Image: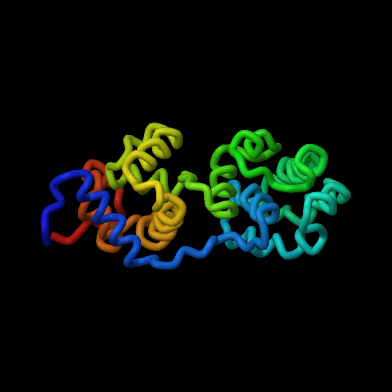
Amino acid sequence: MTELKTKAERVQWTMDELERLYPETPVPLDHVDAYTLLVAVLLSAQCTDARVNTVTPALFALADNPRDMMRQSVEDIRQIIRPCGLSPRKSAAISELSRILVEQHRGVVPQNFDDLEALPGVGHKTAAVVMSQAFGVPAFPVDTHIHRLMHRWNFTNGKSVEQTEHDAKRLFPEDRWNKLHLQIIFYGREYSPARGWSLEKDFISARIGRKSLWKSAAVQPSK
């Protein structure tokens, strides 16, 4: 196997392998438009995408647009989204952001970071997901999988999510950001989990990764 001597070579090889594994990158959260994606991403905080997808059908049957959602009681919203956790905070945020969208944005999800991040319950990562996946604007949302893998692959120092996002945008071509962030998430879930990490399975980390972290892996790479 050819040695990857430079960081640029390691980055390109990683992108090539991710494209080989995941040529298609469907959005993990079920949605039909920018508003339903925004709500789904908000619900996904400290909750799995799979669980969110079991909750949103009932929620969107109740209301699937800001005008209808703002008319619902916070308690009715909370009862539906309870399985996602943090339901008091999330239900209040969904209700309030829906009202703000109607009153300040004519019922339309804004297509810019400033207005999105001003909405209740919407942080930078949530805004980045909506900008990239709903509107196609280049962004690099960093979740726990991306933060973990970028550190394992020695592409960032892992000191903060903000630093990881900065390094990802510096290393990867902008026209790959929207697809690549999903490819890294998919790889993290399948090959490089936080627990039960196996360097026999996680072949990217085994080839280019930060060797100082290998001792934390459950299974070491074969010699």
The residue under the point 70% across, 37% down is 120
The residue under the point 57% across, 56% down is 48
Q: Is residue 121 left or right of residue 141?
A: right
The residue under the point 67% across, 58% down is 33
Q: How is the image coloured?
A: rainbow
Residue 177: % across, % down: 42, 50
**Res 194 visible:** no
Q: Is residue 144 left or right of residue 209?
A: right
**Placement of the C terminus among the 4 image quadrants:** bottom left
Q: Is residue 13 left or right of residue 60?
A: left
**Res 151 visible:** yes
Residue 31: % across, % down: 65, 61
Residue 97: % across, % down: 75, 41
Residue 182: % across, % down: 45, 56
Please identify the quarter of the rendering in which residue 210 is found. top left
The residue under the point 76% across, 60% down is 60
Task: State the residue in front, 141 or 217.
Answer: 141
Please identify the quarter of the rendering in which residue 95 is found. top right
Task: State the residue in front, 77 or 36.
Answer: 36
**Placement of the N terminus among the 4 image quadrants:** bottom left
Labels in figure, total: 0
